[in-house]
Amino acid sequence: MSADTRTATSGAARSSQGARTATRLADGRELVYFDDALREGESPRPPHDLHDPRPLPDRFAPVDSAPFQGPRMRRDPLTGDWVPMATHRMNRTLLPPDDACPLCPRRPGADYTDGEVPDTAYDVVVFENRFPSLLSVPGEPTGPGSVVDATPAEVPGGLWLEAPAAGRCEVVCFSSDHDASLASLGPRRVRTIVDAWADRTTELGALPTTREVFVFENHGREIGVTLTHPHGQVYAYPYLTPRTERLLGQAAAHHEATGRSLLRDVLDAELADGRRVVLETEHWVAYVPFAARWPVEVHLAPRRDVLDLPGLTDDERDDFAVTYLRVLTALNRFFVAPDGGPVALPYIAGWSQAPARDHRRELGRLRLEVFSVLRGPGKLKYLAGSESGAGAWISDTTPERIAARLTEVLA
């Protein structure tokens, strides 16, 4: 591989191939429509309906004459982990009937009741979560230099550190079709979704409170999904998540010892070994990691060193749109039901990106991790004593077996 292809890249998000239209909901939350790119001869989509007629109060309005207070977070003195306390999420929507899903578009001719999308149709839409676990409230002390960056010794009563959970949570709806899934959408739509992910990574990463942007999808009721409409989420954390902190620590130690990138070396080692590589394209590699934890797990990494989603080129985004659908199709064929049919796989998919703000940012590298709690038809892997109590993982299979099965069912 030539030296120029190993250069890590980032920067502002490239403009979406389709249109981007931003507005505000009645309570002040931001909403952005992303339209699919037009095919040759197609007419432009009519302008989106941007008016939200709901009588919602401003989300930061006083409550019972008391100033609005957003979610708080506390640092665990034993681990150093930050834990948001989002008590208001106890009352969030849970598995509503299909005709009352707040992520569906407004039905033509129907009253707009409490749905989140004002228009009657959309391709992809992103909006701030109505029940966020992270929220920046005007006037609260946040950003660099806040208690998040302090050590216990620097704060009075420092054993118990508490701060505003000053981040942002957004919902990304992949389609206006309530019965669709990301796996059922074509490459054209997945490309629009990638552009939306990159756009939000750029926008949220620029907020002064953001340390890390995490883009993810929870799919399937076994995962704990509360709304079955096809959607994902984007979290802008005001701290580095524990897993990212550990990864950067390992990457820093590897770089100090070798002068090389840990994540680059991992990809090169997987390619050289070959046993766990599931799929290779011009721009992407799908592989089961050497120490996979989950019953089904696969990672997708760009061949070129890229820090984050905004750093992907148009060609890399186009290739991913096709490659990811092939991987999702294989995942849905991984298990076979007693009647011989495929089992729709519940999964979590999350993008690991370089942090928005950290002196170790250049040690990061983009990759998508997809994994499932399903270990067989109707059988879940429960995180019992070892995993939950001690944080000591025990795998129910081997990465080589996972890779062999994915290769077998790959379209």
Image: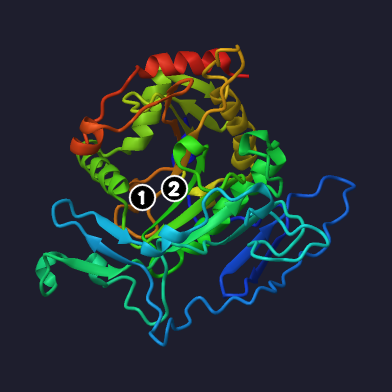
Q: Residue at x 61, y 42 (%)?
A: 317
The answer to whether 375 appears left or right of 122 in the picture is left
- Return the residue nearer the eye: 234 or 6: 234
Q: Residue at x 57, y 16 (%)?
A: 409
Q: Residue at x 30, y 23 (%)?
A: 395
Residue that mark 2 sits on: 307
Helix, strand or loop under label 2: loop
User: Could one spot residue 274 in this view of the protein?
Assistant: no
> Quick check: 193 above or below 289?
below
Image quarter where the C terminus lies is: top right
Helix, strand or loop under label 1: helix
- Return the residue nearer the eye: 324 or 114: 114
Q: Residues within 10 Å of mark 2 (few under 14, many from 20)?
A: many
Mark 2 residue type: Leu
Question: How far across and how far down the image is residue 265, in percent?
Answer: 34, 31
Mark closest to the chain's N terminus, 1 or 2 = 2
Outermost residue to the bottom:
65
Residue that mark 1 sits on: 362
Circles 1 and 2 in contact, beta carbons < 8 Å = yes
The answer to whether 263 appears left or right of 376 in the picture is left
- Return the residue nearer the eye: 369 or 59: 59
